[in-house]
Image (cartoon, helix red, strand yellow):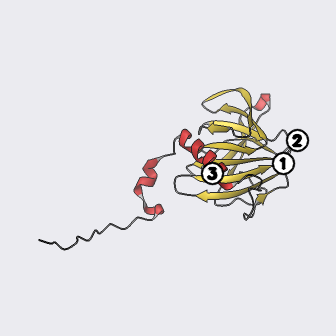
Amino acid sequence: MSSAPTQLVLPPIPKPESDPARDTLGPLDLGILADIASGLACSVIPDGQDGFEGIEPQGSDLRRFARLLHTPAYEAWLIAWEAAADLELHDHGGSQGAFHVVEGALVEAHTDLADPLPLRTLPIGTGESRQVPATRVHRVWNPGPSRAVSVHVYSPPLSSMTFYDDRPDAFLVPLRTDAVEGAPEPGGSR
């Protein structure tokens, strides 16, 4: 006895902007973001190559960046930091993230909006990752003497960044908030 094959009909996949699960999913776990950052770091920059090969970087002479990927749940950026490159004290507008140093070294000075203690400083060397909770405020820089390269992952994708005064008499006073939509303008935040 033979039977006719059954045809499987799947419902259409909704577009990300109309997916109700997207609004309830929330940010990805910090550990998952760190795994994505380190995985991308290994896959996008083979030994001996410039990570921007085939990618048009944006930014200044001291800090260049390029978006590697963008999904509804997270986005990833490649950032090259020349010696003395510095991104002033900032938050990620409610997004959490992780970054992985591919080459060179970075330094992070950080505190937390929920518990604003004095800034704590931590060096991050080649092959090391750092998790960045949504309430973290931090400053990241390359102490030199050579270039540093890192991969940064944010969930949900960045929408804004607020920059803060870090003087002891005005600690964590907001200076400005920059909207982040798509690829930032040259010289912008990231």
Helix, strand or loop for disc 2: loop
Helix, strand or loop for disc 1: loop
Residue 127 position (above or below residue 179) = above
| Residue denoted by label 3 | 40
Q: Amino acid at mark 2?
A: Pro
Residue 91 position (above or below residue 171) = below
Marks 1,3: beta carbons within 8 A: no
> Which numbered marker is on residue 116?
none
> Which numbered marker is on residue 82?
1
Most foreground residue, 95 or 50: 50
Q: Amino acid at mark 3?
A: Leu
Q: Position of residue 189 (x, y in %)?
A: 73, 51
Q: Position of residue 50 (x, y in %)?
A: 77, 56
The residue shown at (33%, 66%) is: 11
Q: Amino acid at mark 1?
A: Glu
Most foreground residue, 154 or 41: 41
Q: Residue 52: name its quadrant.
A: bottom right
> Marks 1 and 3: which is nearer the front?
3
The residue shown at (73%, 31%) is: 122
